[in-house]
Image (cartoon, rainbow, N blue to C red):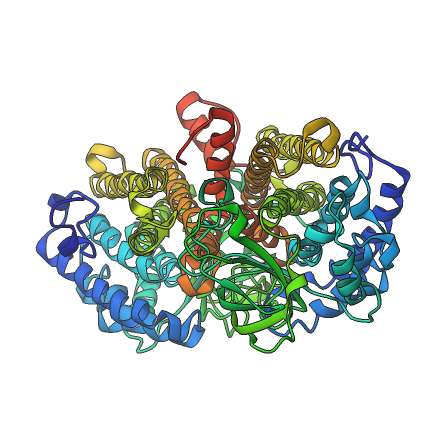
Amino acid sequence: MKEGQSDTIYSNSFFSYPKEWLDAESEDIAESVRKWADNEVIAKRLQFREDLEHQMKTLAILANNIGLYKLIWPEDMGGVGFPLPDVSSTLVRAYEEIGRADPGIGYISAANIALAATLLEDQGIGGEMKKKMAAAFCDSEDVTLFSLILPGLGDINAKSHRIVSGREVQAELRSEGDGWIVNAERARPFNSGYNASMYGVLASLPEGLGFAVVEADKKGVERGELLKTTGLSASLNADVRFRDVRLSEDAVAFVDESFYKRLFAWIRLLMGSVAVGSAIDVYRIVKDWADNRVIKGKGLLRDNPMDAAVLAQVAMDIVDSRLLIHNLARAMAKPEAFGIGGGDDIFILSGVISVRVLDNCMHAINRAMEMMGSAGYSKEWHVEKHWRDLKTMQVYLGGRTPVEMEVARYYYGSDVLETKEE
Amino acid sequence: MRKESPFSKNMTSSPAETYIRRIIRDWADTVVIPMRRHYDEDWHEHRLIEPAFKALMVDLGFQKAMIPAEFGGWNFGNTDYLATASAWMFEEVARADSGIALAFGVCYWPMIMVAVKPHINRRLCAEFAPMFVDTDKPAYGVVAMTEPQGGSDIENLDLLHGQTIKITARLNGDEWVINGHKLWPTNTGGLADLFGVVCTTKPGSDDDEDVAYIYVPADTPGVTQGNAYEKAGMAADKNGDVWFEDVRVPSWYRAHGPGLDARYLKEVLTLGMMSATFSVGPVMNVYEILCDFCSQKTLNGKPLMEHDAIAAELSEIVTGIEVSRAATYRLAMMLDRQDKYGPRWSPEILAMARSTKMFVADRCLEGCEKAMEIMGAYGADRNWDVEKHWRDIKMGQLYEGGKQLAQMDTARYYFDCKTL
């Protein structure tokens, strides 16, 4: 048994991470999120289960009372002014704690913070759009929920669009008068398509790419039926249609592929952090199980060598994953050493690490479930929710093959995923 | 060109198989598959599930399948074809819904002790067969095994010989008096009609003679079924707590008696490993879904199935299906031919059954996981049904003692381990 285990088992440092990359203020933020996780979510799990109203209420506490949504916005826009990209390690710690509580809340808020970070870092995006977005993140008493509509799988029966890194853009923009018109047919959002108040849309332009902010109550915005999904219940999703939705001039920014790569690097960093937190919570649950269950009528499960080997794998997966995700954060925080945000170096590294971390965390949870037998899939024990949530996150991130293609292109020059005109 | 059902036929295929598969497939395609994506919300009420189950068990008559002909059944239990026939029936049902397949299979499970040759107990068959054959409602059979604290210890008969069983059976005159608490049996949560209860006649004993298997009709005074547990999937499979408080049944409700109950209980466990089919059926359906999805959706401008890297993954999935089916039907053949392979309760057959079920569940789960990843966001979408199969197969991997007990039973036989 690790020395001092009983005191540190529920502390944030039981699984090592590089503390020198976080300052005292960042640890304070993480501690606040930790208390939120324990008091607002974990302690009330059996009462609220996956109740959406409770999830949104707790997200509002996280976003507004703790101030997570203001963290990275400059002070002159109403934010706290944590500098980008240095804040990456701080965000990783915060999202580990959120993932421990509810990966679904982590997922929707991570998508929103990733969008904010990408907009702030993209020098090509104008001040008006940034101010408008800052207001949504910093001035709202409720949580302004952004749904991301990003490139994904294409459809053989639908009109084809521009391809970015093998994925097909799901919307198209054209200028009209002094504004823009956006159209999309059955776009599958990354998150929250059913109840978002705003859509952040990466769309094709006649030449290049544009990023559009679309208010959900605009004429021509049509949401489909609520999709039932495996997990991530906090993200109510639906396919979305835009039928000649008219946008003002400042609702659209010209971007290039680096916007997509930067956004995805942030998404992968934060989702990886959520996954690590989720696996840490499963560790806590399976440890409790192994500490209290008897095998062969006598010894505790944890003292049986076969079960000890399974428990060890759970811990090893978490140790690996936590170090990997903190390393990605550090790489993103040091562009002079590891490559700029939006470049291939960080994009590829984020892909490699997020695939590994999600695989590891799913493996950890699967092993824990195997040891818990039927309790592993009983809702009462909550492990199955982490399992469903992380699997859903894994597939919403696009799965393994597209990342493998990116890696092959980067490391071997493989001509496998081009960016193509429509 | 791909055939409609491209997977290899099993080596012991028969005309009856083709006929019965067609009947079940018609039921699956018309009754279950159009509704199954609503089953998760029906886990407690069974308003959708119960009529589908009744159509299979009563209207089509499948709950008669194992009962001997002399008691009005289809006699499968009295043939050399029980496991193989179960395999293709279960596979077809599980293709539509693994939870229904499990509930279906478990309806037979308690009667294996007395309705399967060479140990048919005619008095008990006569007593309980009408529940399955002369009825207009499904008869839910239950094997009540798992107990609080014990986990899969009760299933670990070759090591523990019933030592950890807490539920007691005490002979009082010509009645057994049963007391104790069981967890998790399939077809409980208020559904159960007939329990086969695994008890001890001498608490703490590690002698097979003291393991008793006693039938208890669910309406016997002193039997209480708790509410169904909420789970990750398999809504058709209701599980709950069951309490037995001074439950009295006739002494002849014990299946066979000292020693024989433990022996044939091992056979019950071994035949339970035909639950490998509850993984195979769903992943065969996943293949059908992938055929549609991967021809519609594109990556890098090409249909997914024409993308070399995706095709490699698709190949892994169908390889897993073919090998899993071959292993499952080989196991079925071994279970059916006791003259060649030995009795179903032998450690050799148990090890073979455990390892096959473990291997098949793992491969089928991997196949589902690959499918979900290929489908991206659509893989987690209930409308495509793949994620449902993924949840169900995972549960199938874990029940019946879970993976670790399967590993121990397998290692114990092949390496002659003494203390596992």
Residue in the foreground of this view, choosing between A364 and A218: A364
| Quarter holding residue A59 | bottom left
Q: Which residue in the rendered view is the most extreme toward the front?
A: B173
**Quadrant location of the C terminus of chain A in the rendered image:** top right
Q: Is residue A331 left or right of residue B35?
A: left
Q: Is residue B41 above or below residue B335?
A: below
Residue in the foreground of this view, choosing between A254 and A314: A314
Q: Is residue B51 left or right of residue A48?
A: right
Estimate the x, y position of residue A224 in percent, counting from the top left. 61, 67
Q: Is residue A279 above or below residue A127?
A: above
Estimate the x, y position of residue B305 in percent, counting from the top left. 66, 35
Could you tell me which residue is drawn at 68 percent across and 50 percent down?
A158
Tell me if residue A208 can be seen. no
Tell me if residue B384 can be seen. yes
Could you tell me which residue is drawn at 75 percent across and 43 percent down?
B118
Estimate the x, y position of residue A366 in percent, counting from the top left. 44, 46
Q: Is residue A82 left or right of residue A422?
A: left
**Quadrant location of the N terminus of chain A in the rendered image:** top left
Q: Which residue in the rendered view is the most extreme toward the top?
A: A412
Q: Is residue A209 left or right of residue B294?
A: left
Residue in the foreground of this view, choosing between A422 and B60: B60
